[in-house]
Amino acid sequence: MTVDNLVLQFIDNLADRTHSVIFYEDLKHGRVIQNRYMKVGLLNGEKCVITTHEDDAELIEKEMADFGIDVKHHKKANLLQIVKIRDPREHPEGLVAGIEDLRRQLWTEPSTSSDIY
């Protein structure tokens, strides 16, 4: 079994309501893992949020749809949200302040738009 298969098997067997942070070096590999994780969660009826400071929501939605995820259905069911965020490294007071600002916005200031600034 390859490392990729082990990772995908791990994702398929995660317990409900599991949170994860995934770090990867290869973008293509990371997208496969991300989409598999999101697909499993959405099919289990879990709310999934993707944050990005690089890609736009339409690109992410297309990649997810290409992976077999019914993006429109899950967004309509309020299970999927794609949020464009500012890069915390660009915060005028530094990275730590940028991360804290982002945390505060994501957890205490619910957004009705697809952008958080």
Image: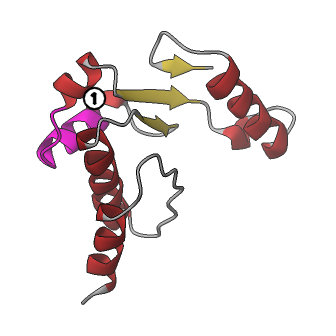
Overall secondary structure of the magenta section: helix
Q: Position of residue 20 (x, y in %)?
A: 51, 55
Percent across and percent down for residue 48 are 40, 36
Q: Which residues are magenta?
A: 59-70
Which amino acid, by three-letter code, is at mark 1?
Glu
Report the front residue among 82 and 85: 82
Q: Is residue 39 left or right of residue 78?
A: left
Q: Quadrant of residue 88?
A: top right
Instruction: Look at the numbered disc 1 and give the secondary structure of its residue.
Output: helix
Location of the N terminus by quadrant is bottom left
Quarter of the figure with residue 97:
top right
The residue singled out by tag 1 in the image is: 58
- Count of numbered marks: 1
Looking at the image, is 116 positioned above or below residue 69? above
Residue that lies at the very extreme toward the front in this rendered image: 15
Q: Position of residue 61 (x, y in %)?
A: 25, 34
Q: Quadrant of the C terminus?
A: top right
